[in-house]
Image (spheres, rainbow, N blue to C red):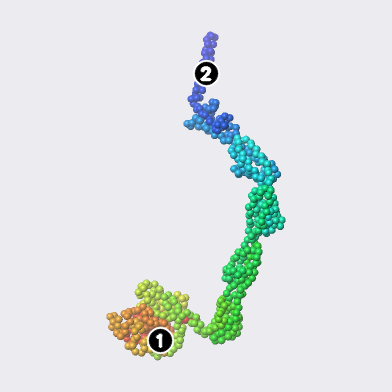
């Protein structure tokens, strides 16, 4: 190949390379424009915009005067301007915006407060809640208005209003202290009180205080142990002297507790009623009080209370029983004992007080005691009547007892002559007794049996029960009063047995002798053949529920000459009682007796027997024999005209 052709080929290659370079140089900006996005970063406020510096810190972009051509999906800029805090701005390529706004915040200003003067002071910036006692105090504050106060006890308050420039600029606030004073003088009682001025303690001389203070408002606090504290607000003018009246603290009340033995005593303080012990009082100290403590039956106690400052106190007052003379007379004459010490034979004079026990003792008699009451006796003559020892229980027992719907009357025991026809059936005495004033009612029996009775039959006699059921009821009633049961139920070789405990004080049915005493109202010698007299036909109206002519349509055995208005059993107490106030002894229902239907050699008779005695008449009684005062019969089973009453021995 010739040299000329080779040179030509090299020249053509240089042209092609140059052409390619020029083509790339021209197409690259076009390419960048096509694939990039132009955004404007707008800096606020306007004052910060001119000096703003924008720095690309993340992503790829090209600065174009005040715009940027960005190519990255996410681009981040740092924008700063003198006097403003730098801020970051984030731009995402997929955002549909072309302007990114950045708000720069002014830097706070640097404030330096310089204080000149020797007095104590405090710098206070209210809006920033800043306080300092430094003579050169630096702090940052946002641009705008600012108040700085400088104040102290002995200086005039200085208030500086500053317009903070911000942008990190330092501003100096100079304050010159101006010392101003007035004076205060006062005396305090008590002299040992603690005095503070504006919460700082000050010293005085023997209760007198005088000192100079800054002009303005001041608070004086006075306190002392045992006194009520006091706070005074005062204002002092410049170069003036404020003289106050003597400041006197009031003592605090003191708690004083008064107790007495015995308690519940009346307390008077300086003649005024305050209450009863135990008593808590609030009294003012530094003075004496006169007290008087009284209680009925005790000698009054007078005294003085010295109440000390700030010291609670307690005092116990022991009352002595009031003593006075009495005359003690005992019938019959006996030995007199006072609080366990023998004093002689009655009659006798004694000196006693409330709560003393006077005893009278005599062989064969129950000891009697007399308790001297709390209230002073008006009658100074004490009379005691002794009771034979064997009669004490009876005398002390109540006249009437109530148990499970049954009313019991107290009946004094007695001896008597036994009617001839009853000599083999009863003994010539009865013990002290409680006896039911009526036969047992259906209502009372239902409490034992659990049965239900209507109001129309509740007060009718309980009839149609056998002797064994009546005995079970007696034992149940005994348990209600915690008494030992009289009847004992058992079984021997499959045979049920009933025995009794003659020493028991539990309930039982009356013996024949006891029933006779009830029937005769305690006077067997006056008892007649019939309850109304000796003549069968002379039946008085209202004597009892007998077989009168109103029973004619039910029975042929009636008395046409007698009317009682009941064709069957009547409610208990439908007719008048006898002299012992016992009801239903004549008519209505016959009554089961305790006695077995055999001869009775002992008081309670035999402990066995299939049949038991009955006594009295009933609403079916019409024959002379059935109407006799002592109409003795016997039965095995219950009947319409057969009921029972209960008694118990008082022992």
Nearest the viewer among 108 and 586 is: 108
Q: Earlier in the sequence, mark 2 or mark 1?
A: 2
Query: Furthest-bottom residue in view?
Result: 420
Q: CA distance from mark 2 to mark 1?
A: 163 Å
Element at label 2? helix
Q: What residue would you read off at disc 1?
A: 520
- Nearer to us of marks 2 and 1 is 1
Residue 508 in the figure: left or right of residue 255: left
Within 10 Å of disc 1 (Cα), the crowding (few <14, some 14-19, many 20+) is many
Kindly identify which residue carries mark 2: 22
- Residue 155: x and y, percent? 67, 46
What secondary structure is found at the residue carrying circle 1?
Answer: loop
Q: Quadrant of residue 540?
A: bottom left
Residue 502 image offset from top left, x and y in percent: 45, 82
Q: Give x and y (percent) for residue 537.
A: 32, 88
* Residue found 40% across the figure and 86% down from its top: 520
- Along the line of sight, which residue is nearer the eye, 421 or 496? 421
Residue 340: tell me if it is visible. no
Q: Choose between 625 and 277: the one closer to the eye.
A: 277
Checking the image for residue 301, the label placed there is none
Q: Is residue 257 visible?
A: yes
Name the residue located 63 percent from the left edge and 67 percent from the top edge.
289
């Amino acid at each position: 190949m010739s040299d000329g052709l080779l040179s030509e080929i090299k020249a053509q290659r240089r042209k092609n390379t140059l052409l390619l370079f020029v083509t790339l140089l021209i197409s690259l900006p076009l390419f960048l424009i096509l694939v990039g996005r132009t955004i404007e970063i707008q800096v606020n406020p306007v004052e910060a915009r001119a000096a703003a510096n924008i720095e690309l810190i993340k992503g790829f972009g090209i600065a174009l005067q005040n715009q940027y051509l960005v190519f990255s999906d996410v681009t981040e800029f740092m924008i700063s301007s003198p006097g403003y805090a730098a801020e970051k701005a984030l731009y995402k390529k997929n955002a549909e915006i072309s302007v990114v706004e950045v708000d720069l915040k002014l830097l706070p200003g640097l404030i330096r407060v310089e204080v000149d003067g020797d007095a104590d002071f405090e710098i206070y910036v209210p809006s920033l809640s800043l306080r300092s006692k430094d003579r050169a105090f630096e702090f940052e504050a946002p641009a705008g208005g600012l108040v700085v106060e400088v104040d102290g006890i002995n200086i005039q308050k200085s208030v500086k209003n500053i317009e903070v420039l911000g942008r990190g600029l330092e501003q100096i606030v100079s304050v010159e202290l101006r010392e101003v004073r007035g004076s205060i003088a006062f005396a305090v009682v008590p002299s040992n009180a603690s005095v503070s001025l504006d919460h700082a303690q000050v010293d005085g001389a023997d209760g007198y205080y005088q000192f100079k203070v800054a002009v303005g408002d001041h608070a004086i606090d006075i306190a002392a142990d045992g006194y009520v504290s006091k706070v005074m607000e005062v204002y002092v003018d410049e170069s003036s002297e404020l003289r106050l009246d003597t400041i006197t603290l009031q003592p605090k009340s003191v708690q004083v507790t008064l107790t007495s033995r015995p308690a519940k005593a009346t307390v008077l303080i300086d003649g005024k009623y305050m209450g009863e012990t135990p008593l808590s009082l609030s009294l003012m100290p530094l003075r004496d009080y006169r007290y008087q403590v009284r209680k009925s039956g005790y000698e009054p106690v007078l005294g003085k209370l010295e109440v000390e400052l700030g010291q609670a106190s307690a005092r116990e007052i022991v009352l002595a029983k009031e003593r006075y003379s009495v005359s003690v007379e005992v019938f019959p004459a006996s030995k007199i004992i006072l609080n366990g010490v023998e004093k002689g034979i009655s009659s006798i004079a004694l000196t006693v007080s409330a709560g003393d026990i006077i005893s009278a003792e005599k062989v064969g008699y129950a000891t009697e005691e007399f308790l001297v009451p709390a209230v002073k006796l008006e009658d100074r003559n004490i009379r005691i009547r002794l009771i034979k020892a064997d009669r004490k229980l009876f005398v002390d027992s109540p006249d009437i007892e109530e148990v499970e719907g049954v009313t019991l009357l107290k009946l004094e025991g007695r001896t008597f002559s036994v009617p001839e026809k009853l000599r083999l059936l009863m003994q010539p005495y009865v013990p002290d007794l409680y006896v039911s004033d009526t036969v047992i009612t259906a209502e009372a029996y239902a409490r034992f049996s659990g049965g239900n009775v209507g109001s129309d039959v509740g007060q009718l006699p309980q009839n149609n029960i056998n002797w064994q059921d009546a005995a079970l009821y007696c034992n149940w009633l005994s348990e209600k009063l915690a008494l030992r049961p009289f009847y004992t139920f058992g079984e021997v070789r499959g045979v049920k047995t009933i025995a009794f405990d003659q020493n028991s004080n539990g309930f039982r049915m009356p013996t024949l002798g006891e029933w006779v005493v009830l029937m005769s109202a305690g006077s067997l010698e006056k008892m007649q053949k019939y309850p109304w007299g000796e003549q069968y036909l002379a039946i008085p109206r209202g004597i009892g529920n007998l077989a009168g002519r109103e029973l004619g349509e039910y029975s042929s055995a009636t008395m046409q000459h007698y009317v009682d208005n009941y064709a069957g059993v009547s409610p208990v107490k439908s007719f008048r009682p006898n002299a012992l106030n016992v009801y239903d002894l004549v008519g209505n229902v016959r009554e089961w007796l305790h006695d077995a239907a055999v001869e009775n050699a002992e008081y309670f008779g035999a402990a066995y027997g299939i049949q038991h005695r009955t006594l009295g008449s009933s609403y079916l009684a019409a024959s002379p024999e059935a109407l006799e005062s002592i109409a003795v019969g016997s039965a095995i089973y219950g009947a319409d005209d057969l009921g029972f009453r209960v008694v118990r021995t008082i022992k």
